[in-house]
Amino acid sequence: MDSTERHAAGTEHPTGSAGAGAADQQPDWPDPARLREVTERLAGAPPLVFPAECDRLRERLGAVARGEALLLQGGDCAETFAGATQESVEGKLRTLLQMAVVLSHGAALPVVKVGRMAGQFAKPRSRPVERQGSVELPVYRGDAVNGPGFTARDRTPAPERLGRMYEASATTLNLVRALTTGGFADLAQVHAWNRAFVAATPGSRRYERVADEITRALAFLRACGGDTRALATADFHVSHEGLLLDYERALTRTDPESGRTYATSGHLLWIGERTRRLDGPHVAFFSRIANPIAVKLGPSTTPDEVLRYVDLLDPDRQPGRLTFVVRMGAERIRDALPLLVEKAASEGAPVCWVSDPMHGNTFTGDDGRKTRRLDAVADELKGFVEVHRTLGTHAGGVHLELTGEDVTECLGGSHTIAPEMLSHRYESACDPRLNPAQALDLAFLLAEWYRD
Ligand code: PEP
Ligand code: MN
């Protein structure tokens, strides 16, 4: 057995409750015996991440909660098994590192980097079935559950896929660990990539000023004897939505040293907008794990709910334990967010506030594809920063769906993606992602708002 110990399927709860009712958004697994076989195998498998790594991330997020750091979290809406490649992982990592340098310079704060990677294989859906003509089939729920093809065979949930999720997560984590410790990118290299982006970007004079300042700051750092090599890749962790409770329970382990139970499927797990029922099994499960955790908050969230999450999920008021990821939509953020932040602040809850400016701004274009306008995404993010500035609280960072490839899934940006271009490279398995140029556009904008 490893430095962690097998936890008896993670079903007991120190405070008793498993949560009321059936868990939301779970697949209709057709073969319970097969499911049990797979989860029993996973319960005996090595952990993917270790308690000390999760604790370290919680400490770093504590700095975000105190206003001393920013969180940058990003990756695919839905990872795919086929996407667990060096090229794909490297591309996302490169984009996140490039953004982090710009943000860190703008805010003059360290950036805690968290990939939406190595476990983001399951999706909640707004409808259980999809209809094409006269045929109706279960929706695609991510590679962890079923296949994307519109055939009965593909769409039937297959428990074996949970085993493949574990394997694809392990492959991805191996790449992440190798790239972040093996000298993939030092700060100077990341900045050189940013300079190349700025040079290739139409109308980028605003960015040039920032890029020049970073060049000078790096020269100053070197002149002082500073070493830029490890700086870019420090502080990289992985996260996913903790959606499939059969999988997550099978991968919980109790740390023999501390006696605390961790989800070992990823460093940080979050509860999605569709599964955050206060008395539900997801909240109950999350209350039992010691990882840093997050909850997505949509526009219907009330201040009292915010307090209930704090009481249930962070009873010890530990900075870095609980992050709220706000996804209201550009039109609602300025009205909906202040009451929530004020309520948490009045109770002294040491939470991180992070903006997901994407999920409240999704719409279906004329060609039937889901998309998002970069302008709307940027506006929600700006509103998020403004609200915190007005209240004197800390805009703790950003949670984005992005990829390292030049896809055409979101509209706008300085390398403009127009509606007729969406079909060129629309490859997302679920929601539309920012391409690297759009992600960097946002990073430069956000950096400006932080320094203003
Ligand atoms: C997501 O992050 O892909 C997602 C489904 O978000 P939300 O739960 O906020 O809708
Ligand atoms: Mn999504």
Image (cartoon, rainbow, N blue to C red):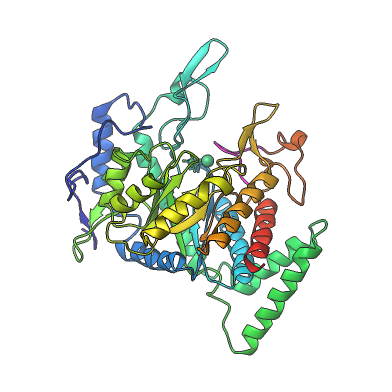
| Span highlighted in magenta in the image | 426-434
Q: Is residue 220 above or below residue 127?
A: below
Farthest bottom residue in view? 224
Residue 288 in the figure: left or right of residue 360: left
Task: Tell me where residue 415 appears, x and y as whole percent.
Answer: 77, 50
Residue 73 in the figure: left or right of residue 313: right
Q: Quadrant of the N terminus?
A: bottom left
- Is residue 181 covered in magenta? no
Task: Tell me where residue 17 appears, x and y as whole percent.
Answer: 20, 42
Q: Is residue 74 above or below residue 107?
A: above
Task: Tell me where residue 170 appears, x and y as whole percent.
Answer: 40, 52
Task: Tell me where residue 286 appears, x and y as whole percent.
Answer: 31, 48
Residue 6 in the figure: left or right of residue 214: left
Q: Main secondary structure of the magenta part?
A: loop
Which of the 4 image quarters holds residue 277?
Answer: top left
Farthest top residue in view? 134
Q: Nearer the viewer, residue 70 or 406?
A: 70
Q: Is residue 237 visible?
A: yes
Q: Quadrant of the C terminus?
A: bottom right
Q: Is residue 408 above or below residue 230?
A: above
- Is residue 433 covered in magenta? yes
Q: Nearer the viewer, residue 298 or 158?
A: 298
